Amino acid sequence: MIEKFISPGDKLELKSTVSVVLPDGTEGVKTYRTSVYDILDDGRLALVMPMEKAKLVLLPVDGEYDVCFFSHGGVYRAGVRIVGRQKISGVYVMIAEMISNLHKYQRREYYRFNCVIDMRAREMTRQEADAFSKGHTCLISENDMTRGVIVDISGGGARFVSRQKFNEDSLILMSFNLPIMESDRPFLLAAKVIYSGGIENRENEYENRVKFEFIDTAAREEIIKYIFDEERKIRKNGKGR
């Protein structure tokens, strides 16, 4: 039955069901991105082992995870338990069994899409923050904005690299374009800095994680559309090879 909704090659996110200490020292839920390798005859799933910094992550057997599957039919969610690890045709996989029913998941904005998008950012003034909170935008100059590169994005936020460290919990302005409907769609968004820290072995470069604030539904849906269109292109190109 699961084959009606999930297919080999589908992207997925596994979220630990228990809190762990994250790289920035805070406590939270660890998320891993990987894909479905195969669906076994007994209904269990073979999932490609996730990687971090070019190394395999050996998730513990008997560990339980909340999983979001990003399939052709939409986003589905279920609980799984890792029951074993194998190597199939040279690919390291985890064998997972479902521990809850698969159901449609609507909160697609949490899916983070890896990308390389030029952007600019700077901290907002109090007047700008007040304007955005009321649904108003403002004219800005990009001359005083720091250049950066968005490396993953979702409808809920983004992660970007810059040569400036931002104050955590501060509000920043982000300016970037996304290719939507064969044209560049400009975005000017307010975002709250969740984390800003140095990158190992990269002097004067900082990783920044932000959550979009005061974003309207139309802008969020356009970002989600961009993500799913790009994922669709990737899947199509992959099948064609």
Image (cartoon, rainbow, N blue to C red):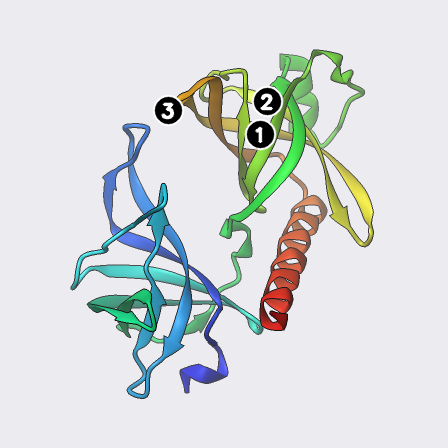
Could you tell me which secondary element the residue under label 3 belongs to?
Answer: loop
Residue 45 appears in the picture as rendered: yes
Sequence order check, earlier mark of 3 and 2: 2
Residue 231 x, y percent position in the rendering: 60, 59
Q: Tell me whether circle 3 and circle 2 mark residues in contact (CB < 8 Å).
A: no
Q: Nearer the viewer, residue 199 or 188?
A: 199
- Distance CA(mark 3)–CA(mark 2): 24 Å
**Horizontal relation, residue 47 to residue 143: left or right:** left
The residue depicted at 35 percent of the width and 55 percent of the height is 50
Could you tell me which secondary element the residue under label 2 belongs to?
Answer: strand
Q: Residues within 10 Å of mark 3 (few under 14, many from 20)?
A: few
Residue carrying label 3: 200
The vertical placement of 226 against 159, above or below, is below
The vertical placement of 82 against 172, above or below, is below
* Quadrant (top left/top right/bottom left/bottom right) for the C terminus: bottom right
Residue 72 x, y percent position in the rendering: 58, 72
